[in-house]
Image (cartoon, rainbow, N blue to C red):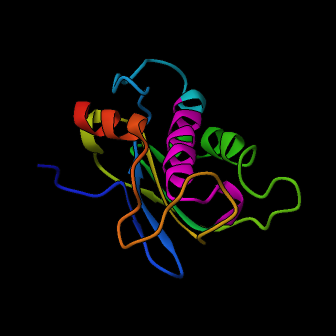
C-alpha cells in the first residue's frame, strides 16, 4: 500500500505530489542539479499527462531544495519548461529544507488546471499511467 497519491484530480484543479529526480526505473541518477531538475519536471509532465493536463496548465509550483546555493541553476532549468509559448508563468514558492526523501537535492510539486493535455483524468484520483504506477512501485 502506498502512502500517497501521485495526483488528485478535482473538477477545478489537479494536485501533483512532489516529484523526485528519478528515472522511470525508479533509479536516482547522478548528475548536475540542472539535470535533476529536468527529471523532476519530466516526472511532473508524465503525471499531468496521466491526469489529462500538461505543463502549460500549471498555476502553482513549489520547489524544495536541500541547498539554496543551487537556486540559480535550478531556476535556469525551470524557466525552460514553464511559461513557454505564451503560457503564463505559474506562481512559485522555493523553499530550502534540511533534507529531502531519499537524499535528493531537489523535489517539485504543482497544482494545475484540468484539460489541455493527454490522458483521461476524471474522478477524484487521477488514473496513473502504467509508467507512473511502475515508478511508484519502485520508489
Residue drawn at point x = 52 percent, y = 48 percent:
44
Q: Is residue 137 left or right of residue 43?
A: left
Residue sitting nearer the eye, 88 or 103? 88
Residue 32 magenta-highlighted? no
**Rendered view: 126 above or below 113:** above
x, y (%) of residue 115?
A: 64, 67
Q: Is residue 128 left or right of residue 62?
A: left
Residue 41 magenta-highlighted? yes
* Magenta segment: 36-57
Residue drawn at point x = 67 percent, y = 67 percent:
90
Residue sitting nearer the eye, 130 or 75? 130
Q: Is residue 117 left or right of residue 138?
A: right
x, y (%) of residue 96?
A: 42, 54
Residue found farthest to the left: 1
x, y (%) of residue 9?
A: 44, 70
Residue found farthest to the top: 30
In which quadrant will I find the C terminus? top left
Residue found farthest to the bottom: 12
Dominant secondary structure (helix, strand or loop) of the stretch shown in magenta? helix
Residue drawn at point x = 33 percent, y = 27 percent:
26
The image quadrant of residue 135 is top left
Residue drawn at point x = 40 percent, y = 72 percent:
123
**Rendered view: 89 above or below 19:** below
The image quadrant of residue 32 is top right
Amino acid at each position: 500500500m502506498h502512502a500517497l497519491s501521485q495526483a488528485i484530480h478535482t473538477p477545478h484543479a489537479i494536485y501533483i505530489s512532489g516529484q523526485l529526480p528519478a528515472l522511470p526505473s525508479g533509479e536516482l541518477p547522478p548528475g548536475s542539479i540542472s539535470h535533476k531538475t529536468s527529471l523532476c519536471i519530466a516526472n511532473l509532465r508524465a503525471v499531468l499527462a496521466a491526469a489529462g493536463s500538461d505543463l502549460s496548465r500549471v498555476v502553482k509550483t513549489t520547489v524544495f531544495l536541500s541547498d539554496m546555493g543551487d537556486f540559480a541553476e535550478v531556476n535556469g532549468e525551470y524557466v525552460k519548461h514553464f511559461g513557454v509559448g505564451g503560457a503564463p508563468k505559474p506562481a512559485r514558492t522555493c523553499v530550502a529544507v534540511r533534507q529531502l526523501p531519499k537524499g535528493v537535492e531537489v523535489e517539485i510539486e504543482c497544482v494545475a488546471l484540468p484539460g489541455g493535455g493527454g490522458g483521461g483524468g476524471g474522478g477524484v484520483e487521477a488514473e496513473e499511467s502504467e509508467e507512473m504506477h511502475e515508478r511508484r512501485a519502485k520508489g
